[in-house]
Image (spheres, rainbow, N blue to C red):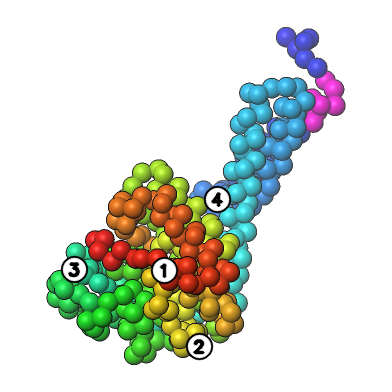
């Protein structure tokens, strides 16, 4: 039965890999028995990753795709699992250092500004989760900044306990500046009128900015509908904006009031790219960049449906490229379609 099997150095090497896979199961079983519930200890990921790497090398030596392919894929997943484990540990350590779980932790006063231009249909869906936030600090101030509205946006906003600021002048940046002008919060959060936050969203924003004297940043975005292409584009945009320190497609920005004042708010002369421009000016003014991916803000893809998501992504990229080299005049010449609803 075993007469045709080889026993050489490579066979022993492969056996070590299989042994590590068995050891991970033993480690998980022991940890689960001790905790009296299912547990995945960190050693599970170490054994899995080491075993997969050994078996990949073994598969290459014996020329077996049947062994190589699943183990090569496993290297990625086990590595990702180990990365998530240490990311979680660092986050928990940071929480302890900052005292975020202490009952006497001083949560910042927060003002949430929603710029709205003829957003009668979507405003209620945006405001409802904001007024019902699970925020442990002072009750957040919610400001609906109505700019140039000719529909029932005011009536939609007044159904909620929010402050309404209104002007006949229109413009996304104007609306943000209008709402922030008299906001009393130490932390300013700008939420597009077609964007929704989870019930703990404001708390997660405050946690991300905690320990920073000056900060400015954005939130990962997720589409409210759409297929695989849309979701891939959003995921790619989130990764790029995290690395390039630009504005993510989630429709949410955050900054401290001091940074907003120092940079003079949003540039109302730019029809596009104003959020990224604001972030980059804030960074130049000494603020730290904050990219929040502990949750994703759900935003409408209505603009993508009209202009096409690929085209929209390229437009954003052109704006970022122009602003990164201070060619603001190129962006200022572009138009922003304010009629998309």
Determine the main secondary structure of the stretch shown in magenta: helix
Give the residue pinned by disc 4: 39
User: Label 2: how many residues lie within 10 Å, few (<14), some (14-19) or many (20+)?
Assistant: few
Tell me which numbered mark, 3 or 4, is placed earlier along the sequence: 4
Left or right of 94 on screen, residue 117: left
In the picture, the disc for residue 120 is 3
Q: Which residues are magenta?
A: 7-14
Q: Nearer the viewer, residue 5 or 193?
A: 193
Give the residue pinned by disc 2: 262
Q: Nearer the viewer, mark 1 or mark 3?
A: 1
Q: Nearer the viewer, residue 215 or 262?
A: 262
Give the secondary structure at mark 1.
Answer: loop
Give the residue pinned by disc 1: 333
Q: Nearer the viewer, mark 2 or mark 4?
A: 2
Q: Nearer the viewer, residue 117 or 270?
A: 270
Q: Give the distance between the C-alpha atoms of the residues marked 4 and 1, in whole angstroms.
A: 57 Å
Tell me which residue sits at (43%, 83%) in the image: 265
């Amino acid at each position: 039965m075993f007469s045709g099997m080889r026993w050489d150095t490579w066979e022993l090497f492969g056996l070590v890999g299989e042994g590590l896979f068995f050891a991970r199961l033993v480690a998980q079983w022991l940890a689960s028995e001790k905790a009296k519930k299912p547990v995945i200890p960190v050693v599970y990921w170490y054994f899995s990753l080491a075993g997969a790497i050994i078996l990949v090398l073994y598969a290459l030596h014996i020329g077996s795709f049947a062994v190589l392919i699943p183990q090569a894929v496993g290297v990625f997943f086990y590595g990702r699992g180990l990365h998530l484990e240490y990311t979680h540990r660092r986050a928990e350590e940071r929480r302890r250092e900052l005292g975020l779980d202490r009952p006497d932790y001083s949560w910042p006063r927060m003002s949430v500004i929603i710029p709205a231009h003829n957003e009668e249909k979507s405003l209620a869906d945006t405001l409802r989760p904001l007024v019902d936030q699970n925020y442990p600090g002072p009750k957040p101030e919610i400001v609906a900044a109505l700019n140039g509205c000719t529909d029932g946006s005011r009536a939609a906003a007044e159904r909620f306990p929010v402050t309404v600021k209104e002007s006949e002048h229109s413009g996304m940046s104007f609306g943000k500046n209008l709402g922030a002008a008299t906001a009393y919060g130490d932390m300013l959060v700008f939420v597009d009128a077609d964007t929704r936050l989870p019930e703990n969203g404001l708390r997660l924003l405050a946690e991300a900015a905690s320990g920073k004297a000056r900060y400015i940043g954005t939130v990962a975005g997720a589409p409210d509908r759409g297929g695989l292409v849309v979701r891939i584009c959003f995921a790619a945009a989130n990764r790029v904006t995290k690395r390039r320190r630009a504005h993510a497609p989630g429709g949410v920005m955050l900054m401290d009031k001091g940074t907003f004042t120092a940079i003079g708010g949003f540039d109302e002369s730019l029809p596009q790219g104003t959020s990224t421009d604001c972030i980059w000016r804030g960074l130049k003014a000494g603020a730290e960049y904050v990219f929040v991916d502990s949750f994703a803000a759900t935003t409408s893809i209505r603009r993508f449906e009209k202009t096409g998501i690929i085209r929209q992504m390229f437009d954003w990229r052109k704006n970022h490229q122009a602003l990164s080299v201070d060619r603001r005049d190129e962006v200022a010449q572009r138009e922003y379609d304010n009629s998309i609803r």
